[in-house]
Amino acid sequence: METEKLYYQDAYLQKFTAAVISCEPFKDAWKVVLDRTAFYPEGGGQPADHGTLNGVPVLDVHDKAGVVFHTCAAPLDAGQTVEGAIDWARRFDHMQQHSGEHILSGIICRRFQCDNVGFHLGAEAVTIDFNTEITWEQTLEAEREANDFICRDEPVNITYPTPEALAALDYRSKKELTGQVRIVAFPGADCCACCGTHVQRSGAINLIKILSCQKFREGVRMEIVCGRRAAAYLSAVYGQAKAIGQQLSVKPLETLAAVERLEAELSAAKARIAGLEQTAFQAIAAEHAGTGDVLFFQPPMKPDSVRRLADAIAQTCGGLAAVFSGEGEHWTYALVHSGGTDIAALVKAMNTALHGRGGGRNGFAQGSLDSSAETIRGFWASHISV
């Protein structure tokens, strides 16, 4: 016997009573079948409802051949009457996301003559895949139209057309459908075959915000949030923009220009530092002119600076320049041989002895290791003349 699906009769129903038809153990839980239920089972890209049956947590819900199975944390006696309570915050969030996705997808499919070929309602955002390329500017235009539709607080129409009426109806569907088809229509925005739960009027969605639109396969993948998720996201973004603005002594909407100024100043400072480093490296290299192999220690520097110092010393010393930058037992290294001599075996031995990782070729190697300066000196004393 199929389960009576109360969530289709009233998507806003939060509590109900039902009779337990069966209860069977399932892994570390129990699968419970009721004669009727308001718990929406996972399907059509929408996650299952959570809640309780007589206070027992409902962890998951699935539909198999019309029978709805409730995965419960504890058993319930067959034949007893139970009270079900839906986790309404979760359900209403799913309704906002799903209805918002319908409106946006309907508008985009009409604007760009494309199809929605993928939909996933995740815990943080909704992803939608379209089989055409769409620019970010076009995405924002569709977002504005969708939010205008929401503001008009249009009614949502859910119907079960006859086969003849369905054949004459222009509606979206991701696959060929058989049997009774459920049509969810947002007149003026979308008409789509759908098995999910939806709001009664578009105004209940409150807001749609598109977070990203990136190339995906033959089209694009969008990430969106709707309703309370959108409000929470924009509030968090504003909070961060305000905090950044306070750090930079600008208003929240002026943070981009302030950051761009900082980036320009940072780039100029990096260029000056690189110039000063190069001058210092050349002076160090001059001190080691003609000395042969060199072992040299420096305070912590960036890997690129370590490489440039080793290269500068190698150009003057006439041998192998081994430069180690760091402190304690954490070091970055760069090895450069002035003649391009193969040092692969030497590097392998050093990494093994000094707990290092890294490598290179053609007389060059770079990496890091975890050993003391004394241990490093001991290794090199037995491998090169320093």
Image: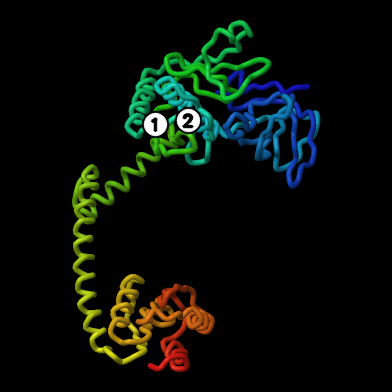
Q: Nearer the viewer, residue 369 or 381?
A: 381
Task: Measuring from the top left, give residue 254's x and y in whole percent.
Answer: 21, 45
Q: For residue 31, what is the image quadrant?
A: top right
SS label for mark 1: loop
Lateral position of residue 228 relative to residue 39, left or right = left
Extreme residue toward the top, this view: 164
Badge 1: few (under 14), some or many (20 or more) residues near its Cα, within 10 Å? some
Q: Which residue is mark 1?
A: 134
The figure's colour scheme reads rainbow
Q: Nearer the viewer, residue 312 or 185?
A: 312
Q: Is residue 104 above or below residue 27?
A: above
In the picture, the quarter occupied by the N terminus is: top right
Q: For residue 44, what is the image quadrant?
A: top right
* Inter-mark Cα distance, 1 to 2: 9 Å
Residue drawn 46% across and 24% down? 114
> What label does residue 130 carry, if any?
2
Lateral position of residue 33 relative to residue 378, left or right = right
Residue drawn 23% across and 86% down? 286
In the picture, the quarter occupied by the C terminus is: bottom left
Q: Nearer the viewer, residue 38 or 67?
A: 67
Q: Is residue 31 above or below residue 68?
A: below
SS label for mark 2: strand
Residue type pointed to by label 2? Phe
Q: Contact (CB < 8 A) between labels 1 and 2?
A: yes
> What label does residue 125 carry, if any?
none
Q: For residue 145, what is the image quadrant?
A: top left
Task: Measuring from the top left, give residue 124's x and y in whole percent.
Answer: 48, 41
Residue type pointed to by label 1? Ile
Lateral position of residue 276 relative to residue 189, left or right = left
Badge 2: few (under 14), some or many (20 or more) residues near its Cα, within 10 Å? many
Task: Measuring from the top left, give residue 367's x and y in whole percent.
Answer: 43, 74
Task: Measuring from the top left, give residue 192's x and y in whole percent.
Answer: 53, 19
